[in-house]
Amino acid sequence: MPANPTEIGWEVDGLWYAGLAWGNPHHPPLLALHGWLDNAASFARLAPLLDDFHVVAVDLSGHGRSSWRSRDATYQIYDDLPQLLSILDQLGWQHCHLMGHSRGAIIATLFAACFPERIARLVLLDGLSPEATGEEAFVTQLRQFVEQRERYLGRQPTVYPSAERAMAVRTANGLPLKAAELMLPRSLRAEGAGVCWTSDPRLRGASAVKLSVGQIEAMLRAVTAPTLVLVAETGLVPLMSSRFAELVAQMAAARMESQAGGHHFHLEDGVARIAGTIQTFLQTN
C-alpha cells in the first residue's frame, strides 16, 4: 500500500471503528469516507498525494476491520453520523475538511448538512445524494427491508479458496484489478481453509426508509461548505444528467467537474490529476 499509512481506531458506542491515517498530523485535517462494500484503503492511492493534509480514512460500520452493528440495528445512510461525530471529537478536530466516495459521499453530504459548523470544505467523488423514493412506496420499501433483514441475518459467509478468487468476484463486477489488489485484502478474513468477506451481509439488504425528493433537497440546501463534486466520466453518475445538475445547484457553493475514469477513478492511473484538483480546491481561500 502506498506511503505506509498508520493504523488507527476508535471505540464508539460499543463499536470499534478502524481506520488509516496518512500525512503530517500537524497539517490541516481531512476525514475520508469510502463507498459501499469498500474500506479505508479505498484512499490508498489518493491520500498520499494530498501531502498538504492529514488524511484519516474510516472503515464505516460493517466494513473492513470495523465492527458489525448489533442484530437489532440497521445500516441506514445516516446511522454512522453519531459515531463519526464522536470520532471527530476523539481526534480533536473541531473543524476539518470532509471527503466521500459513492455511499461515503452521500454520508458526507448528510454530515455536512447536519453539522455545518464542523466542516470547512466538502469533496464528493462520484456521489452526492441517494436516489429519491416517492411517499407511495413507503410501505413496500419497509416490508422489503424486514424480509431481507431476516434473510441476511441468517446468511452464512461464502468461503473462497483464496484471496485471488474472492477478488476476482469484485473485478468481474467492474472493479479494476489494481484497485482490488490495494483495497480488498482489508475486507477479507481467514475462514476455514479459505477466506471470506468481513463486511456485514445486511449491507446488501434494502433500506428501511428512503429519502423523498423534498428531504434530499432540504439536505442539499443545508450544506453551506464550499463543495467540489467530481464525477467520473464512466462512473455511476452521468455528468449530463439534468437531474444531477439540478441537485448540485441546490447547494450554496458547489461546483461540478468531470474526471476521466470509472466509478473508482481515485484508485486508477489518473489519480494524480484528481489529487491536484482536490488539493487546489482545499487550499483556495
Image (tube, rainbow, N blue to C red):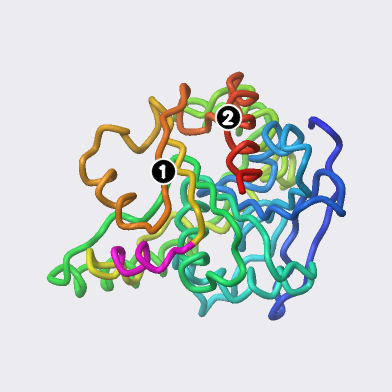
- Residue 246 in picture, x, y percent from top left: 25, 49
- Residue identifier under label 2: 274
Q: Is residue 136 left or right of residue 225?
A: left
Cα–Cα gap, marks 1 and 2: 15 Å
Q: Label the magenta part by its dominant secondary structure.
A: helix
Residue visible at 51% across and 65% down in the picture: 112
Of residues 98 and 74, the one nearer the viewer is 98
**Label 2 crowd (10 A; few <14 / some 14-19 / many >=20):** many
Q: Are marks 1 and 2 in contact (CB under 8 Å)?
A: no
Amino acid on which the number 2 mark rests in the picture: Ile
- Report the span colored magenta: 216-224
* Amino acid type of the residue that numbered disc 1 sits on in the rendered structure: Arg
**Residue at image point 75% right, 58% down:** 18
Question: Is residue 101 magenta-colored?
Answer: no
Residue located 52% across and 32% down the image:
264
| Residue pointed to by mark 1 | 255
Report if residue 223 lies within the magenta region.
yes
Which one is in front, 151 or 26? 26
> On residue 74, which mark appears?
none
Residue 210 position, x and y percent, is 31, 66
Residue 42: name its quadrant: top right
Of labels 1 and 2, earlier in sequence is 1
Q: Position of residue 229 (x, y in %)?
A: 45, 43
The image shows residue 43, relative to residue 132, as above or below, that is above
